[in-house]
Image: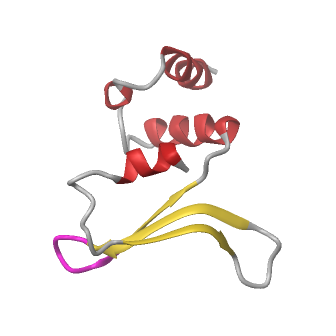
Amino acid sequence: MNYMYKVLNDDEIPSDAGVAMEFNIPQTSKRVDFIISGYGADSDPEVVIIELNKGEAIWDIAILVKKKVITIDDLEGFSEELIEAVKFILSR
């Protein structure tokens, strides 16, 4: 939780954004670690779902790079281990 506080304590996240922790998905036994919700600059609703499972996160990041949502350069500041794992997945 302390780590997520540091991540969420960011001036770019609006102070009126909604944050849900360990959100249980209705009618399932599944849950989401964090949900951040609010409205974008164009007043459209926006939601970010954060899962803290390291193995799945690496695959999710690789998918985002492959779909050109983000680039490898956007991973600057992340661990070299994570960046190399993403590059390995993309090379397959």
Q: Which range is magenta? A: 40-45
Residue 53 % position (x, y): 67, 43
Whether 51 is drawn above or below 22: the answer is above
Quadrant of res 31:
bottom right
Residue 22 % position (x, y): 64, 65
Q: Measuring 83% from the left and 72% from the top, which residue is drawn there?
A: 29
Whether 24 is drawn above or below 78: the answer is below
Q: Measuring 48% from the left and 49% from the top, which residue is drawn there?
A: 4
Residue ranking furthest to the right: 29
The chief SS type of the magenta part is loop
Residue ranking furthest to the front: 2
| Residue 46 is at least partly visible in this image | no
Residue 85 is covered by the magenta coloring: no
Q: Measuring 38% from the left and 53% from the top, which residue is drawn there?
A: 8
Residue ranking furthest to the left: 41
Number of labelled discs?
0
Residue 43 is covered by the magenta coloring: yes
Q: Report the side of 77 relative to 88 (left or right).
A: left
